[in-house]
Amino acid sequence: MNGNHEEVNIEGLLRADRIPHIWCPGCGLGSVLRSFLSALIKSELPLDKVAVVSGIGCTGRTAGYVKLDSFHTTHGRAIPFATGLKLANPELKVIVFSGDGDLSSIGGNHLIHAARRNMDMTIICVNNFTYGMTGGQAAPTTPLNARTSTTPYGNYEIPFNIPYLIAAAGAVYVSRWTAMHVRRLEKSIIEAIHKKGFSFVEAIAPCPTQYGRKNRQATGLTQMNYYRDNSIINHGADPRDVGIELNGPINVGKFVDIDRATFSDLQADILDKAFPPESKPQTETTRT
Amino acid sequence: MSRHGLLEGEYFMNGDVASAEGAICAGCRFFAGYPITPATEVAERMAERLPEVGGTFIQMEDEIASMAAILGGSWGGAKSMTSTSGPGFSLMMENLGLGAMTETPCVVVNVQRAGPSTGLPTLTAQGDMMQARWGSHGLYGIIALAPSSPQEMFELTIKAFNLSEKYRTPVLIMTDESVGHMSEKVVIPPSNQIEVFDRRKPTVPVSEYLPFKPDADLVPPMGNAGEGYRYHVTGLTHDERGYPDMTAEAQEKLVRRLIDKIELNKDDIIELEEDEIDGADVVVCSYGISARVALLAVKAAREEGIKVGMLRLITAWPFPNNRIKELAGKIKAFVVPELNAGQMALEVERCAGGAAETVLVGHMGGNVHDPQVILKAIRKASK
Ligand SMILES: Cc1ncc(C[n+]2csc(CCOP(=O)(O)OP(=O)(O)O)c2C)c(N)n1
Ligand code: SF4
């Protein structure tokens, strides 16, 4: 594995014919995408066997910019789509790249169940604390008191602490970095990609247009400065303790890295017992 | 059982189980589903059988996930299926549209029960026929088949897979609780006598492949994920490369083709069963369990000397417009018994265009028609 900090050329993994992209100036998505693609190259995976699946949202558009087998599905449903893709072709490395709203609100049920099953896939969740694409409404991640277009007086809902949620649901790898931690994020994505089972990387990223503007962080730069001044590297922190409050500290680091049998491991165990090799009917996946 | 784990010979099985066996014979190797009466037996059978033939079964967290998973499975290269009934069918609608938009071969079995809402969970109905055609938002073509016996559940599930692979589209099996739970003899031929159609693969070099560029039949060849194409697939309106194109022109071109690839290939897709139509005054047009009940009424009417033919819709969608139009000019009336308040009857009426009367024999479901009610309608229509 090549975990060094060398710059790699990610151009070959971008669909040049789809540039300019739709993201706003100052948006954190470009930076997270750069860390992702760079991680992918350094992971040395055979790229023809990598598939990226996104849901809907600004983050969801990522699938459309990467030059890999890439699927832009429906809002919240990237994970079950990815589940089918992986089970149909276990050779594939399946990576879900989507937004906090997509994954933890409308897709929340799929998120916890895929983690429970320890489905072998990597999730990159870009958390900008809001629904960027639809104009900055509250998300399940929006901190208490934050302003959004649907919480004009301040948010009175308690947000999800996503690492805690996903660790409790059974993920074997859980980390959080911000768009400012380019290299650490990249390194964490490499680890997540190589981790067998359900691995989850939360990438906190600026959405100046919809979230920053309403919460006194009007530019991408002010948001990045906030991350720089308030991030605390806290590897191994109890996920319970890493919730994020408005303008509060952001615990970053690797919170969970454990081993647990995956869906496919357990499936093979049980089915090998049910069908001992000698009794096993010949399998055939394609018929002539 | 054959060496390959495929059944062959004569069996006594219910429609749900027969559908699962048809899927296995058609080459289905991925099933994702969620339990619901009266379709659960399809999933249970697949859970038992798929491991025997090297396939994968997964019980998902809900029907939204099930539908999403079979789309993923299909792009992963496995023929994929799910099964459900009304409430689950409603949950599948958004991703069914994704399947239509991304031209993803897959099969969805709907064993209809009486609705709306939870309705009569264990009892028969045919209330989802229009939902099958129009249930997902926006415009698209769809194929739906309507088996009326366990034998047909077996055969039409194979046909559904073949059509889905050939036309790159989700195909629906629209049966009903009566057929799903009815046990009858099912004959399963040796696998080498079963025609199986696999998706047409690209013939151009990887670098030249455009995943949404159609051949002459309006269907694009399909490469699977992991084969090196590195394509993009999106539910957004897209061009032949699969890239989003947010223009009215792209919408016209793509969506028109999605509809046309079904409409213009109707002759290949549509299957009807006709009996004593020539010289008939009345034609009973029905499908699924209602067609079997109607047959009793048709026989009784013939004994009374009424000239009555029977037209059974084996394919519900695309609808056989031309055949109905043609018959309308020759007969007095269509009688349409169905377990709803008039769904396929509306299509019959539309196509008849006033040239023949259309008489709906509706029934809200929960049980099947009393054949006497259909007989009365035939008598009246023949006058
Ligand atoms: C079923 C459905 N409901 C609502 C929408 C509208 N919608 C599109 S994106 C989005 C929110 C996206 O938020 P998030 O996942 O946080 O991504 P971001 O845009 O912030 O990157 C919503 C509600 C939709 N596309 N589909
Ligand atoms: S709305 Fe926010 S998340 Fe979306 S592109 Fe603009 S800055 Fe990025």
Image (cartoon, coloured by chain):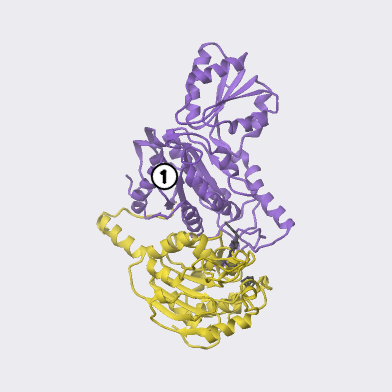
Chain colours: A yellow, B purple
Residue bearing the label numbered 1 = B36
User: What x and y, as percent, mark residue B41?
Assistant: 38, 43
Task: From the viewer's side, name the closer residue of B237 and B207.
Answer: B237
Read off the chain for label 1: B
User: Does mark 1 have its CB less than 8 Å from ligand 1?
Assistant: no
Judged from the image, the quadrant occupied by ligand 1 is: bottom right
Q: Position of residue B35 (x, y in %)?
A: 40, 47
Residue at the extreme front of the image, as rendered: A153
The residue nearer to you, when weighing A158 against B327, is: A158
Occupied quadrant, residue B192: top left
State how many labels appear.
Answer: 1
Image location of residue B375, percent across then percent down: 52, 17
> What residue occupies the far right of the structure in this picture?
B249
Q: Is residue B292 above or below residue A287?
A: above
What is the secondary structure assignment of the residue under circle 1? loop
Task: Identify which residue is drawn at 47% across, 82% down.
Answer: A187
**Residue that appears at 58% across and 59% down:** B202
Q: Amino acid at mark 1?
A: Ile
Q: Residue at x 42, y 74 (%)?
A: A174
State whether residue B15 is above or below residue A164: above
Foreground residue among A103 and B380: A103
Q: Residue A81 at what x, y percent from top left?
A: 49, 59
Residue A195 visible from this viewpoint? no
